[in-house]
Each structure stands twice: as structure tokens, then as C-alpha cells.
Image (cartoon, helix red, strand yellow):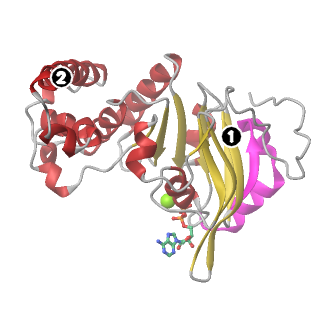
Amino acid sequence: MSETDEPADDAAIPVQSVDLDSDVPLEVEGLRKTFGGITAVDDVSFGVEKGSLTGLIGPNGAGKSTTFNLITGMHEPDSGAVRFNGEDVTGLPPHEIATRGLARTFQIARELEEMTVLENMMLAPKGQMGESLWRSVTPGLRNDVQRQETEQLERVWDVLDFFEIDHLAEEYAGNLSGGQRKLLEMARALLTDPDVLLLDEPFAGVNPSLEKRLLEHVHDLREEGYTFLIVEHDMDLIMENCERVIVMHQGRILKDGTPTEVKQSEDVIEAYLGGEV
Ligand code: ADP
Ligand code: MG
């Protein structure tokens, strides 16, 4: 899937070709992050094509979650850059990055378990509007805010309906099954109508039938034009569902290609057989 253009002039490193306002909404270049003496992410570069389902896999400790955290602003890289829709977003706080359309899923935190599904959904985007706006509304603005609230509620119901959890709206999040929780997590991430969705192990602890359903939702959304970067431990799942796979090992990119290319890579086979998977 990832047939690239001519290599860029300055391409000393084999980076996916990069065109700022192109079909590569998310692009990382030369990302590096150390924790004490550990280099968790070491010169990582890749681009995620618009409308793609791209998988990021690798053995435990390979640096997947750290890469994810660098992209979403949870960590600041020691060096390197993250570009989103042609803008440099390196080092921006997570909410700024989210507001620009790069969303991620969050596990339902303990305090949210005591709220209903609907309340969880209503909380998500309001937090992103900023408290100050809500406090300092002038009468003229108040209508705007009310209109926004109505629109938000409509969006909430649409998304709940899409994930087929609208019947659970009044249920406490803490009472949901593991799989229903994953649906809610994805529903929350979708509320802001992001361009790109990052999912970190979205299928962990999900039973096979719900996994299938979650995957169907992901494929449906992709067909609507959403772009996904999925971090996964389960190599087979990624191989079967993504058209592009990036393999990390010991902080570096070992292979970036189609599932077939990845499967045939001796480096990948060695990394998976040689290490703890
Ligand atoms: P993966 O998600 O692929 O399992 P991680 O990105 O979580 O890998 O971890 C990569 C390496 O960085 C591991 O050696 C891990 O122990 C280390 N690491 C990750 N986060 C931290 C942190 N906050 N502090 C110290 N070391 C970390
Ligand atoms: Mg991880």
C-alpha cells in the first residue's frame, strides 16, 4: 500500500517520502526518547497515510507505547519531530494535539466508573473547550454555548448509536464488561471527530466476538475516511487487518511494509523468535 514517491533530495535516511500538505497527515521524524540509561525510542521515522489502517507492532519493551506517547504529547522527545496535518506539533500538550484532530483512546479512569456512559461522553469534549469559556460567557455567547451543547448531545447519541452502546447510556461505566468499556473508550475518542485515531492495544482483554465487532467498527470508520494507527502486541491481528505494518524492536524500526513484506523479513522473524513476544 505504501508505495512512495521519489526519495526526497536530502534523504540520507530511508524515511517515507514526506509531503507537507499531502496524504500523510501524521509524520514522525528522528524521534528519540531516553529514560535514564534506557533508549526507549531511537531515531524513529515513519508516516501514516490518510485513510490507512497502520499497525505498530513489536515485542514487549520495543518502544511502542513510548512512541505513542511522544506522538500524543504525553512525553516530550529528546530529539526529532512530530508533524500533524503539515504542522509541527512536537512538544505541544496533549489537549492541544487532540484539538487539532489527533485523538487517542484513554482507559476509563476510576472516577469515571462512577458516572454513566452518557456522562462519560458529555465530559469528553467539554473538557477540551476549556473551563474559562464556560465561566465567562456573556449573554450573546450563552446562546452559542447552548447551541453547542445541543449539537454535542446529538453527536454523542450518534456515536453511541454507531458503536451500538446507546442502550447502555444510563449504565454506570464501572458496570460495563471489558469489551463494552473498549467501545466506550473508542466512542469517547471519536467525539471530537478526529482525523487520525491512535489506539494503544485496543483489543487487550477483549473476548473474540467483541474483538470482531470492534474491528468491524474500525474498518467501517476507515471506509468513512478516518485514519488509524494501532499499537498492538498481537502480531496476527495486525497482519490480518492492516495494510501497512511497522515493526519496532529495541527502540528502532526494524521493518516498515506490507504484512507480506513484514512476514518475510528475516529480521522480524529473528526478533520475534529470539525475544519474549
Ligand atoms: P512497549 O510499549 O513496546 O512494550 P515501551 O515503550 O513501554 O515498550 O517501553 C520501551 C522501553 O522504555 C522499556 O525498556 C521500558 O522499560 C522503558 N520505559 C518506558 N516508559 C518508561 C518510563 N516512564 N520510565 C522509565 N523507563 C520507561
Ligand atoms: Mg506498550
Q: Nearer the viewer, residue 135 or 93?
A: 135
Q: Looking at numbered disc 2 in the image, what kind of residue is underneath it?
A: Leu
* Magenta residue span: 252-277
| Residue visible at 48% across and 42% down in the picture | 198
Q: Quadrant of the C terminus?
A: bottom right
Q: Quadrant of the N terminus?
A: top right
Tell me: is circle 1 under 8 Å from ligand 1.
no
* The magenta stretch spans residue 264: yes
> Residue 154's x, y, as percent?
21, 18
Which image quarter: residue 177?
A: top left
Q: Secondary structure beneath disc 1?
A: strand
Q: Nearer the viewer, residue 198 or 243?
A: 198
| Residue visible at 41% across and 25% down in the picture | 217
| Other residues around mark 2 within 10 Å, as few (<14) / some (14–19) / many (≥20) | some
> Residue 153's x, y, as percent?
18, 22
Of callouts 1 and 2, the N-terminal one = 1
Q: Is residue 30 above or below residue 221?
A: below
Q: Is residue 58 above or below residue 21?
A: below
Residue 66 falls left or right of residue 44: left
Residue 145 falls left or right of residue 270: left
Task: Measure the C-alpha gap from mark 1 to mark 2.
Answer: 34 Å
Residue 73 falls left or right of residue 248: left
Q: Which residue is mark 1?
A: 47
Q: Looking at numbered disc 1 in the image, what kind of residue is underneath it?
A: Gly
Q: Is residue 76 above or below residue 38?
A: above
> Residue 243's x, y, as percent?
66, 31
> Residue 42's x, y, as percent?
69, 65
Farthest residue to the bottom: give it. Answer: 37
Q: Which residue is mark 2?
A: 153
| Residue visible at 21% across and 22% down in the picture | 148
